[in-house]
Image (spheres, grey):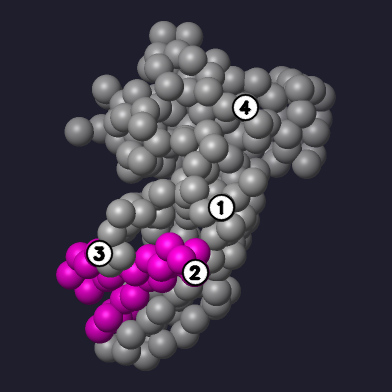
Amino acid sequence: GENVEQHPSTLSVQEGDSAVIKCTYSDSASNYFPWYKQELGKRPQLIIDIRSNVGEKKDQRIAVTLNKTAKHFSLHITETQPEDSAVYFCAAMNARSQGNLIFGKGTKLSVKP
Amino acid sequence: GAGVSQSPRYKVTKRGQDVALRCDPISGHVSLYWYRQALGQGPEFLTYFNYEAQQDKSGLPNDRFSAERPEGSISTLTIQRTEQRDSAMYRCASSLNQQGTGEQYFGPGTRLTVT
């Protein structure tokens, strides 16, 4: 079945710097890749997603890139702010069931003012 | 509009008791998913429904776990004869369509503690 690896597990940046989180997936048939932000004690919130027919998607300070050949996708956050501090999860759609998401283990991002 | 809601938000039960966790998806959402999230980990898939039909239950850990969505709206996840290892955050999510590429929106979760 699908397996999603996420790196790094922790990331600390200075306010204003960029942050990059990388994920790889194993099933080449996977076709949908969302990113979730989870603040302490809160539910995961969808922040951006990408489908397999595009290579990049941008929404203000966040962007996601997808390399289908290499089976990896990345989240880029520019001009980081303290409120970006949270745990970020990547996920891949289970292509076989076309339903559930397979999540990475998460990256704890700390943005220091 | 209202998001995904879950009840109860916290549940403490004794080992061996049965528990029922409820999920109320966003109105009109076709697909409903159950996940379990351990502290510091990503959500782990349990089962999901399109309308009232259970599409995939491969993530249910064993036969003590079951789920239903009889009218295609509210869903109940039932754990029988609870064990301490069942302690976790149980999260529900819903999505508008059943095509498998719709955005999934999560509920606040039910924190289950088995003593």
**In this view, B36 is above or below A109:** above
Looking at numbered disc 3 in the image, what kind of residue is underneath it?
Answer: Lys
Mark 3 or 2, closer to the camera: 2
> Of the numbered discs in the image, which one, if any, rests on residue A57?
3
Which residue occupies 75% across, 23% down? B64
Residue to which mark 2 is pinned: A70
Q: Earlier in the sequence, mark 1 or mark 2?
A: 1
Q: Position of residue B63 (x, y in %)?
A: 76, 22
> Whole-Å distance between the Cαs marked 1 and 4?
20 Å
> Of the numbered discs in the image, which one, if any, rests on residue B57?
4
> Whole-Å distance between the Cαs marked 3 and 2?
18 Å
Looking at numbered disc 1 in the image, what kind of residue is underneath it?
Answer: Asp
Mark 3 or 4, closer to the camera: 3
Q: Are marks 2 and 4 on the same chain?
A: no
Q: Quadrant of the C terminus of chain B?
A: top right
- Dot 4 falls on a residue whose secondary structure is loop
Looking at numbered disc 4 in the image, what kind of residue is underneath it?
Answer: Lys
Q: Are marks 1 and 2 on the same chain?
A: yes
Horizontal side, residue A58 vs residue B31: left or right:
left
For label 3, count other residues whose C-alpha is less than 10 Å away and answer few (under 14), some (14-19) or many (20+): some
Mark 1 or 4, closer to the camera: 1
- Dot 3 falls on a residue whose secondary structure is strand
Mark 2 or 4, closer to the camera: 2
Residue A34 placement: quadrant: bottom left
Chain letter for the residue marked with disc 3 in the picture: A
Looking at numbered disc 2 in the image, what kind of residue is underneath it?
Answer: Ala
**In this view, B79 is above or below B94:** above
Chain letter for the residue marked with disc 1 in the picture: A
Which residue occupies 36% across, 54% down? A52
